[in-house]
Amino acid sequence: MLALVMPLAYNAVRNLWKSPMMRLLLIVTLALASLWGGYWYVGQVAVEKQGVTFLEQLSAQGWKVRYESLETHGFPSRFDTTLTGLDLTAPDDEFGWQTPIFQLLALSYQPNKVIAVWPETQSLRLGGDTIIIRSEGLRASASVTVSTNPAFETATVEVGNLGLQSDTGWVASADRGLLALRPAADDHHGYDAYLDTSALVLPLALRERLDPEGAMPAAIALAKIDSTLTFDRPLDAAALSGAGPRLTAASMRDLRLVWGEMVLAVSGELGLAADGQPSGKLRLTVTGWDRMVGLGVNAGLIHPADEQTWRSVGMSLAQGADTVEVPLTIRGGQIWLGVFPIGYLPTF
């Protein structure tokens, strides 16, 4: 069969070569292929060099950096960089990250759009804790503008089942999670931020602190944040040098927590002073407000001395119902209901 096909193929190519148009087309095709191959090779070398340089810079700053290999493959359409055996430790030994493999994937014709892929098991060291992270499909995508000063465009982090287990004994989990950030349409320094997670199980010690009577379900059904965050300058390459951008305002379209029969919804606008103290107006809609006050006290968000004030206000507004709507004014971090101070928000 091969003896029959090879002469036929040879004759076909020879006949095509006799046509000036086909010769030109073939020459152009080979030239373009050579140029693209050269571009990919130069890009592959540059990507690997940037990765090695970044790790060397961390090492020069006092980080302990160990890894087995860093390689980029994917010719001709991708730059797929794989880092294996990575072990990072911060200069103060308070943070560390260890992963058997980590990947950054990009199309070779869109290198400004990157997908990061984590393995099913990795570990973090935070202070004295080593936390084993087990996840399904943990990945992130991000893009920046094509510019000499690249600016942030979008970022999304997604994960399926997520489990955290500390060597000190606590565990936490969630069925899924989504985190997204993108520039706001009408604000030069604003970014739409979205967080959504379900079946969130907090560590047992924290649950017992918030709910010492064990009246609430183990899992928080929904935790959601839909907001716009405004900074004092854009998130771009220049922001990586020196002090980072400062958060100046937060617009909350829908902050929602569903835990058993208790539902908390928050909307409103907050501005943040240079010292991080918030001011603005919020509207709270609370179902199960009586239990919410107790959780707020246990969490330290409501001072015990203010608990009775909150309960009196709740009873007055609820008029026997289980759901209340509360308009609040925030001035210098202090929470006001009309002319009555009822608590404080934390400094951001």
Image (cartoon, helix red, strand yellow):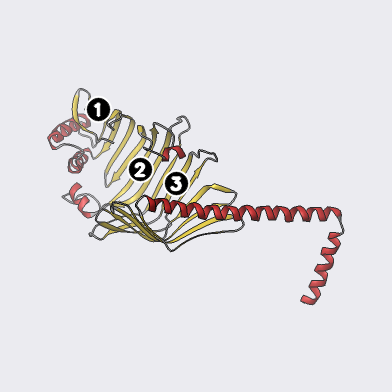
Is residue 236 in view?
A: no
Q: Is residue 143 shown left or right of residue 39?
A: left
Q: In terms of image quadrants, where is residue 257?
A: top left
Q: Residues within 10 Å of mark 3 (few under 14, many from 20)?
A: some
| Percent position of residue 61, x then y | 36, 49
Instruction: Give the residue type that dot 3 points to.
Output: Thr
Q: Is residue 296 shown left or right of residue 227?
A: left
Instruction: Give the residue type that dot 2 points to.
Output: Lys
Instruction: Give the residue type that dot 1 points to.
Output: Gly
In the rendered view of the protein, which quadrant contains the N terminus? Answer: bottom right
Task: Return the disc, 3 or 1, that comes first in the chain's sequence.
Answer: 3
Q: Residues within 10 Å of mark 1 (few under 14, many from 20)?
A: some
| Percent position of residue 57, x then y | 41, 50
Residue occupying the point 33% across, 46% down: 222
Q: Which residue is mark 2?
A: 224
Is residue 238 in view?
A: yes
For this rendering, which residue is in front, 30 or 193? 30
Q: In terms of image quadrants, where is residue 317?
A: top left
Q: Residues within 10 Å of mark 2 (few under 14, many from 20)?
A: some
Element on which disc 1 rests: loop
The disc label shown at residue 321, or none: none
| Percent position of residue 172, x then y | 29, 55
In the rendered view of the protein, which quadrant contains the C terminus? Answer: top left
Q: CA distance from mark 3 to mark 1?
A: 33 Å
For this rendering, which residue is in front, 339 or 346? 346
Q: Which residue is mark 1?
A: 332
Q: Which residue is mark 3?
A: 156
Task: Return the disc, 1 or 2, that comes first in the chain's sequence.
Answer: 2
